[in-house]
Every structure is written in C-alpha cells, then in structure tokens.
Image: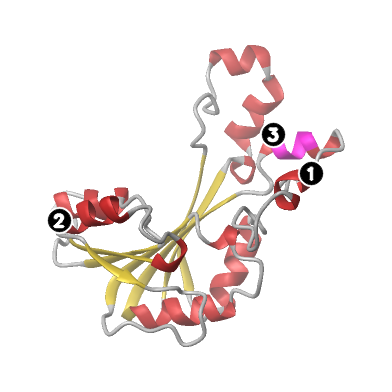
C-alpha cells in the first residue's frame, strides 16, 4: 500500500464499520463508502459520524435498487461481504457498481466460499452448508443472512456476465484457528492437506476485476 498511487480514489460499497476506508484514509488515499442508511434508523448514527469526522465520505446508497446512482466515479470499488446477503439476481447490482467505476476502473469482490472444506465435510454428514432453517424462520422480513455463497467458478462467471475481466484471484482463511499448523495436522490431517493443496477449499474467495 505504501508504494501504491495515493491519487487513487476508493469506494467501499456496504462499508458499515468503515474499517477499510478508515485505514485507506490514514494511508493517504481518497476514501469513501456507501451504506443503505434506511436499514439502521439512528442506531449507528454515532459510528457514521465518527467515520465522517476522519475524512471518509459516506453516501446513502443502495446498490441493489434499480438505477441507483451517484454523481461520483472511483478508480477502485470494493464489494466485500455483500453479495451473499442478496436473494435475487445480481444483474442490477453489477450494473450499478459498474456505474461507480471510472473507465478502466477496478473492482475487488470478496465472498464466503460455499466449497469451504468444513462445509464439504458437514454436507457429507447431512448438514446444510447454507443458513440454518431456524435462523431464516425466526427472522423478520427481509432475512439479511446469507442467501447464496459462491464458488470461484461462479465469481468468474459473475465478472464475465458483467463485462469485466478477472485480473487476479485470492483464496484464504479468516476464522481464527483455520490456518494450517501443527495442531491442525495432528487433529484434522485431511483438512490440513486440503487447505495446503486445494486453494478452492479455503474459507474466502476474492477476485480483482477490470472494466
């Protein structure tokens, strides 16, 4: 990050806690984020005020709404931990995201991997890799949990269908205790080998795209 072009403008769509844009702002970038504020009332008013006080611009913006638009364009747009929460077609979202990007702008997408190794094992034992029915049943409408988790092939298709080219891919674990180590080798040797040799079995997937 220290060697990157600090003139780049970055927008984190669905930034919520603001961790990424705040970090980028501290590093000297022009950073902004979007949130659909209608979902929160005044619950996080203090949090959003703090984020803005640090120089991060917040746009009240729902990327899933038809013809959602901002009057700004960005060099880089990030979309992390967002796609999996939407139950319908991603076509409108990706069209709106594309409108946020400058010509030759880049988009970074991160999602949970439905082919994560522990989920594969759970499925073999008869447990769903999706949200538990009880959680969905007891939820108010709309259910804002995970509706669709992804495989890397699906992310590639999403980019292609949206008219974007994949520049790079990443596969990683983020949950504490999920990184291969000696303890995992002893207790869960198959998982240890899967994480080392099968990157598609890791917890999170990410792609960097270009228009």
- Disc number placed over residue 53 in the picture, else none: 2
Secondary structure under the numbered disc 2 in the rendered image: helix
As drawn, 206 above or below 60: above
**Who's the residue at 39% across and 73% down the image?**
61
Q: In this orientation, which residue lies closer to the viewer: 52 or 39?
A: 39
* Marks 1 & 3, CB-CB < 8 Å contact: no
**Who's the residue at 59% across and 57% down the image?**
144
**Sequence order check: which comes first, mark 2 or mark 1?**
2
Secondary structure under the numbered disc 1 in the rendered image: loop
**Who's the residue at 66% across and 72% down the image?**
88
* In the image, residue 205 lies in the stretch drawn in magenta: no
Judge the density around disc 1: few (<14), some (14-19), many (≥20) Cα neighbours within 10 Å: few
Give residue 97's position: percent from left, percent from top: 43, 76
User: Which of the 4 quarters of the picture holds residue 4?
Assistant: bottom left
- Disc number placed over residue 118 in the picture, else none: 3
Extreme-front residue of the structure: 42
Asked whether residue 208 is in view, the answer is yes
Q: Which residues are magenta?
A: 118-122
Report whether 120 appears left or right of 19.
right
**Sequence order check: which comes first, mark 1 or mark 3?**
3
Mark whose residue sits in front, 3 or 2: 2
**Badge 1 is on which residue?**
128
Cα–Cα gap, marks 1 and 3: 11 Å
């Amino acid at each position: 990050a220290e060697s990157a072009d600090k003139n780049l403008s970055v927008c984190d769509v669905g930034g919520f806690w603001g961790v990424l844009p705040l970090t980028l702002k501290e590093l000297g970038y022009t950073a902004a984020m979007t949130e659909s504020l209608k979902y929160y009332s005044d619950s996080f008013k203090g949090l959003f005020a703090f984020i803005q006080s640090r120089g991060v611009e917040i746009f009240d913006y729902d990327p899933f709404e038809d013809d959602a638009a901002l009057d700004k364009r960005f060099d880089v747009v990030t979309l992390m931990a967002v796609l999996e929460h939407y139950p319908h077609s991603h076509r409108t979202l990706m069209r709106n995201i594309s409108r946020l990007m400058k010509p030759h702008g880049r988009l970074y997408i991160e999602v949970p991997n439905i082919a994560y190794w522990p989920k594969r094992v759970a499925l073999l034992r008869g447990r769903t890799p999706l949200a538990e029915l009880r959680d969905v049943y007891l939820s108010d409408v709309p259910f804002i949990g995970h509706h669709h988790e992804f495989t890397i092939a699906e992310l590639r298709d999403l980019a292609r269908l949206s008219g974007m080219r994949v520049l790079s891919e990443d596969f990683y674990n983020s949950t504490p205790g999920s990184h291969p180590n000696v303890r995992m080798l002893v207790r869960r040797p198959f998982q240890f080998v899967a994480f080392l040799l099968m990157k598609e079995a890791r917890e999170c997937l990410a792609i960097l795209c270009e228009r």
